[in-house]
Amino acid sequence: MIDSLVTFVIGVSGGNAALGIVLFTLTVRVLLLPLGVRQARAARVKERLAPKLRELQKRYGRSPERLSKEMSALYAKEGSSPFAGILPGLAQAPFMWLIFRVATHPTALAGHQLFGAPLGQQVAGVVANFGLVSWPVLVFAVVIVLIAVVAWFASRRIKVSEEQPELVRRLLPLLPFGAVLAATVLPLAAALYLLVSTAWTAGERAVLAARPL
């Protein structure tokens, strides 16, 4: 299945694997946009209900069953549920996995390049084959730097609640930079996917946060 999908993605892009990965990623993200809207709406509901949820936790903290019942009732008044923000994310996971598999296919990407840098090689392999100071390494470095810029932008938009444990508050802003670390050990094709996908996610969240849902 993956072989056929990779062949199709490369074929519809005129044999340009890099363009195919970009177009395929964007197409899937557009199709998943309704789930992103639902996730953003659930996040707003949770933020709006935060003060009332804290009151319920103080009042019924010693009675988990009663707390769960009261929280469910509170969410129900808003036409939502405590799991409304989780389910859309889980639904997106198989599609994200599929895109990743396309971007890391070992054989179909052989011979394909992005501005002269091999899509199927990791940065260590590119350095070994072309030298540290070379055009392919520069291409890889530019992609990683762009991912870092997107991660910085996304990190600044993460909202941290005072009720969260201190360790969680420290770690949350660092999570977007995981894509930067991944790009240094994955093939260039996967790094390209991470750039497109993380940029889409950051832009989508910024737009949805600024618009009424």
Image (cartoon, rainbow, N blue to C red):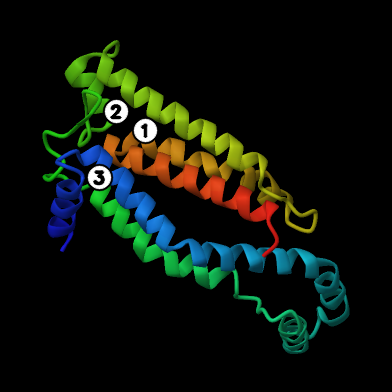
Q: Position of residue 91 (x, y in %)?
A: 44, 70
Q: Are marks 2 and 1 in contact (CB under 8 Å)?
A: yes
State how far apart marks 3 and 2 are (Cα): 21 Å
Which label sits on residue 209?
none
The residue under label 2 is 123
Q: Label 2: state its secondary structure.
A: helix
Q: If you read the primary sequence from the N terminus, does the residue marked by circle 3 or circle 2 appear first?
A: 3
* Residue name at image x 62 percent, y 55 percent: 208
Q: Residue 81 vs residue 136: left or right? A: right
Q: Nearer the viewer, residue 44 or 12?
A: 12
Q: Quadrant of residue 14?
A: top left
**Disc 1, disc 3: CB below 8 Å?**
no
- Classed neighbour count for the residue bearing mark 2: other residues with Cα under 10 Å, few (<14), some (14–19), many (≥20): many
- Mark 1 or mark 3, earlier in chain: 3
Q: Tell me, yes or no, if residue 70 can be seen here.
A: yes
Q: Which mark is residue 184?
A: 1
The residue pinned by badge 3 equals 20
Which structural element holds mark 3?
helix
Q: Is residue 187 visible?
A: no
Callout 2, which amino acid? Answer: Val
- Residue found at x 70% / y 48%: 169
The disc labelled 3 sits on which kind of residue? Answer: Gly
Q: Are marks 3 and 2 in contact (CB under 8 Å)?
A: no
Identified at 35% across, 43% down, the residue is 193
The C terminus, quarter of image: bottom right
